[in-house]
Amino acid sequence: MTGLLDVIVIGAGAAGLAATRALREAGLQVATLEARDRIGGRAWTESSTFGFPFDRGCHWLHSAKVNPWVGYGEEHGFSMYADPDGDATFVGGAKASEGESDAFFSAYQGFVKRVAEAADRGVDAPLSDYLDMGDPWALSVAGMVTHGDFGKPLEEVSTLTYPGHDDYDDNWFCKEGFGALVAHYGRNLAVELGAPVRRIAWGGQGVSVETSIGVLAARAVVVTATTGALAAEKIRFDPVLPPEKVESFHAFPMGLYNHIALLFSHDVLELGPDAYVYTRVQSDEPSSWISNVGGTGLTLIWVGGSLASDLEKAPVESALEYGLDRVAELAGNSARAAFIQGDYTRWGQDPWTLGSYGSLKPGAAVAGERLRRPVGDRIFFAGDMCHEELSGSCAGAFVSGLEAAKQVIRRLRREAGRR
């Protein structure tokens, strides 16, 4: 990779891979740099932990009707299937009555409706403003959103970041793993691994990118680092970026969302594959999880925010014991006898993401457009926070990568036309 390149793509997650492929298919000379020793970013499937595909990051293919990964998986022979949408609600360790279960879903749906109506009116306010604390299921709703959706308290999330499109809950799964889909997509793309970017100089005509493997020059650069990494200045810009651009990084702080993964010898709750568990809670704790993932006996308990952070600082056994206690509350001590092994994901300790995914903080409504806006007609941005409709998802990252590539192609063609 010597001489002047057309484009440098920073990051080989879904956004970076999508941008790379589109740019190369347009005939451009592209170098793609990835800090990790693998591609995929937060879409990461591995089989060494449990002996079968385990998604350490992305797992749900949200918004299946508009999610490009669903079609990609079907086209390339992956085992794709719709979320069976089975569930059970528990109160005090026992299955809830039909009335109690209906009351829980009514509380959750009422919350979502109030938030969606506010967002439709352009209201930029904390999600907590729309939680009915007088409802006996209020803390369970808060637990779902804090631990299962954003990885942060409702007070820290804007109404404008909540999924507003009708098909968000149309979820699919991939038996081989979501990360396996992304890895397959990028399998033939040349990516320079183990090459973190330290500095981007853009004071001249093009850009100069300083990496651990040397300095590369190009006409343009596509940056797909997380808002967490950008806000922490993992990549320095010279000259510094405009203040409103820097502010946009801080407007989407990273949430912390991890999985306590517990493998049991069988379906200990006898709810069938991919069944959701909802519980009434009396404090700020997880109130939902998924059991018997893909029929494997694996349970994933979602933990977010300060609890997720505290568990990251403790030995993994602490997270597993916490998770086992929660399952045993419902399935009895037989669950402990059926427990085989477990693990705990630690995205807050990942140096390249500094969290799981971002979300818009209250009062920062203009930040989305500013985050997506190029700088100097040569620095372009892509990633899960750069897509307005699919924000916070692997699908959103993919589509934003394609959109950034189109912007770059148009810019370079304009430049060529002026020569």
Image: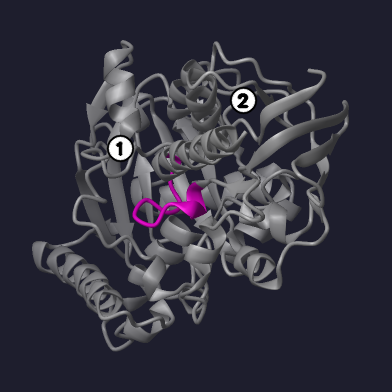
Q: How far from the left and from the top, in percent, is residue 152?
A: 53, 66
For the point 26% across and 51% down, the residue is 168
Q: Quadrant of residue 103?
A: bottom left
- Residue for badge 2: 39
Which residues, given as a range, are shown in magenta?
384-394
Q: Is the magenta stretch mostly helix, strand or loop?
A: loop
Up-down relation of residue 121 to residue 243 (above or below): below
Q: Is residue 25 left or right of residue 224?
A: left
Q: How far from the left and from the top, in percent, is residue 164?
A: 27, 62
Which residue type does callout 1 highlight? Asn
Secondary element at tag 2: loop
Q: How far from the left and from the top, in percent, is residue 69?
A: 35, 29
Q: Is residue 385 left or right of residue 118?
A: right
Residue nearest the observer in this picture, 69 or 53: 69
Which residue type does callout 2 highlight? Ile
Up-down relation of residue 418 to residue 354 (above or below): above
Q: In which quarter of the image is residue 67?
A: top left
Up-down relation of residue 195 to residue 154 (above or below): above
The question of residue 390 being in magenta is answered with: yes
